[in-house]
Image: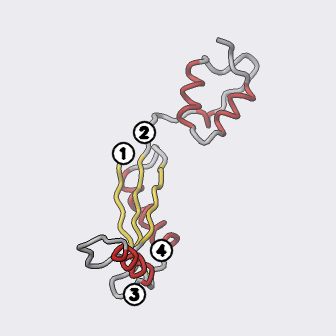
Amino acid sequence: MKDLGCAMRRALCDAANARLARSLIKLHRYPPAGCEVHTSWLTYNDRFMTAYVYVSLKKSVLDPQGKTIQGALNKMGYKGLESVRQGKYFEIKLDAGISRDEAQTEVERIAREVLTNPVIEEFRFSLAE
């Protein structure tokens, strides 16, 4: 198999699927002669922490979109619906170099300051490795 050139490795690094890029680089015995080592290609391990953040309207806030969805579901023949409330869902990949406590603090801050409007919305989140 031909060795990948430095430019190709850099392009793989910039690709959306960094895990695939790291695997290809390992297969080809990086770096080729004359190329510098790009530390952005590597992580200490392939394990990332993922935060799952759920944002919804507070119970005291009317949810017209949820009501519309509920009405549509009733018209379509779905039974047993008491109520429908809509919300937002976020998946956030966290760097492997951050501790679980730091991740929890950071995700809570992101959710409170960026992902929600604290006047009308509330959030909950969980972390998984």
What is the crowding at mark 4: few (fewer than 14 residues within 10 Å), some, or many (at least 20)?
some
Who is closer to the viewer here, 94 or 64?
A: 64
Residue 76: image x %, image y %?
A: 36, 71
Q: Earlier in the sequence, mark 4 or mark 2?
A: 2
Rounded to the nearest angstrom, the CA distance separating label 1 from label 2 is: 7 Å
Q: Which residue is mark 1?
A: 129
What is the crowding at mark 3: few (fewer than 14 residues within 10 Å), some, or many (at least 20)?
few
The residue drawn where x is 44% and y is 43% is 48
Rounded to the nearest angstrom, the CA distance separating label 4 from label 3 is: 16 Å
What is the crowding at mark 2: few (fewer than 14 residues within 10 Å), some, or many (at least 20)?
few
Who is closer to the viewer here, 89 or 27?
A: 89
Q: Which residue is mark 3?
A: 62
Who is closer to the viewer here, 62 or 98?
A: 62
The residue drawn where x is 23% and y is 73% is 80
The amino acid at mark 3 is: Leu
Who is closer to the viewer here, 103 or 88?
A: 88
The residue drawn where x is 62% and y is 34% is 39
Q: Residue 2's mark?
A: none
